């Protein structure tokens, strides 16, 4: 299911033995366009600090009550390394984070999460043999603050299209499937969806995302309303319009899976973690 990342801000984070903090931001991998971490504020009035929580840690999510349940204790989260999410997070910090929790690295293989598409595969255990890591590019930082990315301008092949207002994220893989682009500066009240994988360049200095599509092309794309569900039929029309292959054709999930759709807020029921209920197939 696709969910608004902005709507997940201020969700409560609960450990196995009680509430531990509140979501204040997210870190997005701008190379693979995956949400790698929640930035969680923990502590009391005079000792607040921020820590990273990976989707690998999720036990289940209660969308209706806006709550992430972790398969961790309060003490484990409280003793985890602090982070300044306003600064680039180094690979070394990620190594320390993974080592502290005993999780395998998500990088070094071809999948979104190591060898697979879902974070549950990084939980240490039988059948989760670590992939052989590839040499990394020194100084290559790919984690970006979601709050920083909001407001970035989308630059088309001819004219500006709008600015990033939100992200729609798959709540199983934590992949960013769409940037929600506000075009109200030139097309009153209209919002369009653009896959981040259609961008050919992101300029952090200019705060711009460049796409090889004209303003006219974007304007004539299948209309999307914020209150409308995003089902596979709509996505197929969108991808066919742009002449792009559907991401679902190679995402490692069965085509028999119900098509994802968008909830702008908490939906009914409880979504269990893929850790205990799902496995990857290729």
Image: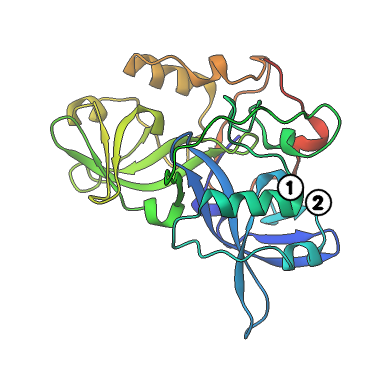
Q: Distance between the residues labelled 2 and 1?
A: 6 Å
Q: Which residue occupies the extreme bottom position in the image? A: 46
Instruction: Indicate which disc residue 171 carries.
Output: none
Q: Name the residue under label 1.
A: 58
What percent of the width, then of the height, locates residue 63? Answer: 68, 49
Q: Are marks 2 and 1 in contact (CB under 8 Å)?
A: yes
Left or right, residue 14 beside residue 260: right
What percent of the width, then of the height, locates residue 222? Answer: 35, 25
Left or right, residue 233 beside residue 266: left
At a point 70% along the width and 44% down the height, the residue shown is 56
Vertical order, 21 against 137 (above or below): below
What percent of the width, then of the height, locates residue 73? Answer: 82, 61
Label 1 SS:
strand
Vertical order, 195 against 124 (above or below): above
38, 182: nearer the viewer: 38
99, 151: nearer the viewer: 99
Q: Does residue 50 appear in the picture of this structure?
A: yes
What percent of the width, then of the height, locates residue 12? Answer: 67, 62
Left or right, residue 170 beside residue 78: left
Q: Does residue 63 appear in the picture of this structure?
A: no
- Count of marks overlaid on the render: 2
Q: Mark 2 points at which residue?
A: 71
User: Which quadrant of the figure has residue 14?
Assistant: bottom right
Mark 2 or mark 1, earlier in chain:
1
99, 259: nearer the viewer: 99
Label 2 SS:
loop
At a point 38% along the width and 51% down the height, the residue shown is 149
Left or right, residue 259 beside residue 74: left
């Amino acid at each position: 299911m696709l969910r608004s990342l902005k709507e997940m801000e201020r969700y409560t984070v609960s450990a196995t033995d009680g509430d531990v903090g509140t979501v204040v931001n997210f870190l997005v991998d701008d190379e693979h366009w995956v949400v790698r971490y929640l930035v969680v504020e923990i502590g009391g009035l005079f000792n607040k600090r921020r820590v990273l929580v990976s989707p690998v840690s999720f036990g289940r999510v209660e969308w209706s009550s806006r709550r992430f349940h972790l398969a961790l204790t309060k003490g484990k989260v409280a003793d985890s390394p602090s982070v300044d999410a306003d600064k680039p997070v180094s690979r070394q910090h990620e190594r320390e984070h993974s080592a502290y929790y005993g999780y395998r690295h998500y990088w070094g293989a071809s999948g979104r999460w190591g060898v697979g598409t879902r974070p549950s595969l990084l939980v240490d255990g039988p059948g989760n043999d670590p992939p052989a890591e590839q040499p990394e590019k020194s100084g290559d930082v790919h984690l970006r603050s979601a709050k920083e990315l909001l407001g970035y301008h989308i630059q088309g092949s001819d004219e500006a299209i709008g600015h990033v207002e939100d992200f729609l994220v798959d709540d199983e893989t934590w992949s960013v499937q769409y940037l929600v682009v506000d075009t109200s500066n030139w097309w009153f009240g209209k919002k369009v969806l653009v896959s981040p994988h259609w961008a050919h360049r992101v300029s952090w200095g200019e705060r711009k995302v460049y796409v090889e599509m004209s303003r006219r092309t974007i304007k004539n794309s299948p209309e999307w309303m914020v209150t409308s569900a995003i089902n596979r039929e709509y996505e197929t029309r969108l991808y066919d319009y742009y002449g792009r292959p559907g991401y679902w054709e190679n995402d490692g999930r069965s085509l028999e899976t119900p098509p994802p759709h968008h909830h702008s807020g908490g939906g009914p029921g409880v979504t269990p973690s893929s850790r205990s209920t799902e496995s990857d197939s290729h």
